[in-house]
Image (cartoon, coloured by chain):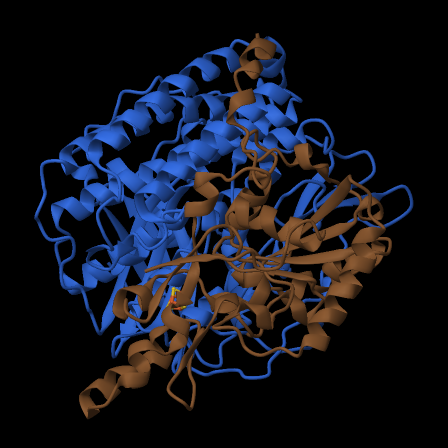
Chain colours: A brown, B blue
């Protein structure tokens, strides 16, 4: 009975990234700054308008938005919990990034508009990652550790196994044993209680290994950053290779981050921007 | 009635519970005068709060657990958070924050002081080992789990010839949520509430907002009440499908697992189609909602009809798979009298004949107008009954989704939010999550949060795992854990 029922699932599997997938492409990712962070913010003149503009820094509950000296605005997507306040309050300035390509290979790569990173740093980092991914075969084993998530990140990771995403088709498998794992995918803001178990899991993995910080909490600590109980993201505990924001990140964003870490995609596939 | 004191609290609560009230929580708040201990009792129509001040520098009081067993974890949490010792408690060891002996530091939620630079690194060595000696052993499972699961440690203590005892260590995920709420503007609190248990974001946002709305005395407009019900029920459907998929997975039924995970994916996609978030975040705001569904009623009705049909067919197939039913039948039984005494919440309580569904006993939003469906009332208390309860309720939820979607088509043009900016006061709010009732005790001053204590159904129910564990961690345990279907994030906060 179950065998027959199973056959009907074949058609639901996405072909992304080989073929575009509308759900992936339309996904409402973290907030972004429209128009390179200048636009109206640069033009503000009257005291009244300045009043509004001065509150830009206060708009975001996690402090992701920053107003530069020159009047331009930056947004750290690694801190964005996708609450939408900036998009609602200042639609001329902020919009949603669309698509699955929200992850980046550097923490700074999550700041929009892009901050100047020295090319050597980026090149060095890419070379280091390439050195490690070359050693991995077509089939890759993933170990997940929850370091203080809200529980939704686990759902989105588990979703990668459902017939829609079916990561097995890409040669990706979850493993229970750190000794067989190539990739460590970590969720949660980095509770102090999980710091030691997380470190032990990392140490138990053979080299070379890749670490993915999955979700805004794992990237920066999100709303919980830096308290007596929680660190400001797992980067304070482990060296991170791929940073993927989202609250939680969608399965497609996780898949993108994974392929990015494995060197099977370009960094920051151009994310389309819509208001 | 004579005022309740710390000395009489246990006796008074026991009397209330014997009289039919449900013990719903025991929380503390640090105040300049001492620690205010608040006990919550749920009745038909309302939740009552009893307050007892333990004057500073008092640090102990007679344990409530001695008389009301359901307070077992609550008192351990009070001890970690405030340093209060429940005298006579059967196992007064740290629960959410085991600090090295003599650390002497406690987060003391309610005390409006920042603690910059305090790093409270939990130390498992601060926890006593109860089972020591030759031939006696303890087997740990976790905190890093073998599947994609939240972190928790289960310790099976095997004291010689006796039945093994299950000890749960939940402190690994303690995130300091209660202190984080403090001093937040009241409007921001909902963002954190949504993240207390990410798989019950809507229910947590609702319970928090209900408390604010009670304080403001505002009436949520009808379209907002309908949209809230729509999202709350979609969240329930997703949660129940998750439990079903996990149970099928535990039984090694690959196709059934795939199909139920696919249905769950479709629900999450529908939710994201409606509001941009797969978890309904940003929908519930104090006084109403953030916006109408981005898809029209017709689309919602069509997709839910397709889903319900597909789920119905697969459920019938699953419940006709005898090898599956055999694994669940008799597994992890919770006796009805234990469920009642503990006030077991949600599907766990209902599967043991104890039903206090706050949607219907203390209705809110669009639920007052809803007649609860007549469910068949499975009450065997085992993993199978817990699944059957959920399957029955899936049908009820689909009915409520249909109802909300069709009524929404008739309320176009009405406002979506009432003014809700309370500045002062204290109120309790609740909502029925997929795991059971979520309770929020919120206190404001000057428009900011002074104290916010969320109590998840997961915290209240997880401790019942002690009761139903029969000593076998390998074979039965995955079914018990999946059939409880709780969220670890909501436990140690
Ligand atoms: S969406 Fe919310 S969290 Fe993200 S940048 Fe805008 S205000 Fe900040």
Task: Locate ligand 1 by image quadrant.
Answer: bottom left
Q: Residue at x 42, y 38 (%)?
A: B268
Residue A26 shown left or right of residue A209 in the figure: left
- Examine the image and state in which quarter residue B301 appears: top left
> Residue B46, position in %: x, y?
23, 48
Which one is nearer the viewer's eye here, A54 or B329?
A54
Indicate whether A249 appears above or below A46: above
Q: Determine if residue A3 is in view.
A: yes
Which one is nearer the viewer's eye here, B356 or B423?
B423
Residue B113 shown left or right of residue B42 in the figure: right
Residue A218 shown left or right of residue A27 in the figure: right
Q: Residue at x 72, y 34 (%)?
A: B473
Indicate whether A28 appears above or below A199: above
Indicate whether B208 appears above or below A256: below
Q: Determine if residue B188 is in view.
A: no
- Examine the image and state in which quarter residue A174 appears: top right
> Residue B440, position in %: x, y?
35, 57
Task: Give the quarter of the figure containing the N terminus of chain B.
Answer: bottom left
């Amino acid at each position: 009975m179950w065998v027959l029922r199973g056959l009907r699932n074949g058609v639901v599997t996405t072909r992304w990234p080989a073929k575009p997938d509308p759900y992936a492409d339309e996904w409402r990712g973290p907030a972004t700054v429209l128009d390179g962070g200048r636009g109206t913010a640069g033009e503000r003149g009257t005291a009244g308008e300045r009043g509004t503009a001065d509150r830009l820094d206060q708009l975001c509950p996690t402090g992701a938005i920053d107003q530069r000296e020159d009047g331009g605005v930056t947004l750290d997507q690694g801190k964005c919990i996708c609450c939408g306040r900036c998009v609602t309050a200042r639609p001329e300035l902020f919009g949603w990034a669309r698509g699955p390509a929200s992850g980046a290979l550097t923490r700074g790569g999550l700041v929009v508009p892009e901050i100047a990173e020295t090319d050597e740093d980026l090149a060095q980092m890419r070379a280091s990652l390439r050195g490690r991914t070359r050693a991995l075969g077509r089939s890759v084993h993933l170990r997940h550790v929850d370091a203080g998530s809200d529980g939704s990140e686990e759902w989105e990771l588990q979703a990668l196994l459902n017939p829609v995403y079916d990561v097995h088709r890409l040669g990706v498998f979850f493993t229970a044993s750190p000794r067989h794992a190539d990739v460590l995918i970590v969720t949660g803001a980095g509770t102090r209680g999980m710091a030691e178990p997380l470190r032990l899991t990392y140490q138990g993995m053979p080299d070379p290994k890749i670490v993915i910080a999955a979700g805004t909490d794992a990237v920066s600590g999100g709303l919980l950053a830096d308290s007596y109980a929680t660190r400001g993201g797992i980067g304070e505990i482990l060296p991170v290779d791929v940073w993927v924001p989202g609250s939680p990140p969608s399965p497609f964003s996780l898949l993108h981050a994974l392929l990015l870490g494995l060197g099977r995609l370009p960094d920051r596939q151009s994310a389309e921007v819509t208001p | 009635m004579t005022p309740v004191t710390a000395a009489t609290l246990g006796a008074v609560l026991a009397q209330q519970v014997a009289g039919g009230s449900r013990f719903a929580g025991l929380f503390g708040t640090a105040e300049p005068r001492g620690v205010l201990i608040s006990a919550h009792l749920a009745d038909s129509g309302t939740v009552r709060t009893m307050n007892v001040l333990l004057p500073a520098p008092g640090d102990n009081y007679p344990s409530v657990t001695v008389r009301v067993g359901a307070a077992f974890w609550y008192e351990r949490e009070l001890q970690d958070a405030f340093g209060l010792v429940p005298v006579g408690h059967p196992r007064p060891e740290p629960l959410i924050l085991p600090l090295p002996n003599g650390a002497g530091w406690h987060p003391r939620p309610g005390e409006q002081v920042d603690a910059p630079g305090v790093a409270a690194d939990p130390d498992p060595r601060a926890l006593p080992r109860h089972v020591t000696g030759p031939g006696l052993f303890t087997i740990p499972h976790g905190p890093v789990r073998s599947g994609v699961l939240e972190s928790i440690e289960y310790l099976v203590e095997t004291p010689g010839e006796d039945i093994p005892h299950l000890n749960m260590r939940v402190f690994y995920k303690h995130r300091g949520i209660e202190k984080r709420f403090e001093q937040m503007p009241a409007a921001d609190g909902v963002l954190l509430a949504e993240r207390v248990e990410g798989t019950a974001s809507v229910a947590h946002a609702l319970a928090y907002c209900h408390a604010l709305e009670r304080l403001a005395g505002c009436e949520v407009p009808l379209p907002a009440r309908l949209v809230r019900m729509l999202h709350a029920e979609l969240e329930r459907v997703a949660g129940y499908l998750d439990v079903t998929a996990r149970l099928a997975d535990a039984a090694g039924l690959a196709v059934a697992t795939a199909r139920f995970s696919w249905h769950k994916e479709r629900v999450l996609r529908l939710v994201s189609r409606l509001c941009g978030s797969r978890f309904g975040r940003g929908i519930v705001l104090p006084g109403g909602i953030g916006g109408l569904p981005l898809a029209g009623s017709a689309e919602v009705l069509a997709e839910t009809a397709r889903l319900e049909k597909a789920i119905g067919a697969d459920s019938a197939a699953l419940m006709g798979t005898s090898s599956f039913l055999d694994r669940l039948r008799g597994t992890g039984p919770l006796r009805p009298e234990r469920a009642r005494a503990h006030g077991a919440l949600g599907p766990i309580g209902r599967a043991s004949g104890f039903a206090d569904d706050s949607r219907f006993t203390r209705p809110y939003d669009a639920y007052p107008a809803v007649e609860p469906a007549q469910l068949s009332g499975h009450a065997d208390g085992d993993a199978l009954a817990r699944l059957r309860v959920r399957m029955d309720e899936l049908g009820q939820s689909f009915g409520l989704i249909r109802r909300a979607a069709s009524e929404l088509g008739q309320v176009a043009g009405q406002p979506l939010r009432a003014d809700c900016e309370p500045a002062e006061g204290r109120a309790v709010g609740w909502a029925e999550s997929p795991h059971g009732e979520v309770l929020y005790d919120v206190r404001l001053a000057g428009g900011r949060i002074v104290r916010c204590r969320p109590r998840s159904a997961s915290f209240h129910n997880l401790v019942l795992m002690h009761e139903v564990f029969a000593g076998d961690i390998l074979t039965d345990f995955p079914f018990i854990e999946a059939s409880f279907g709780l969220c670890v994030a909501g436990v140690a906060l």
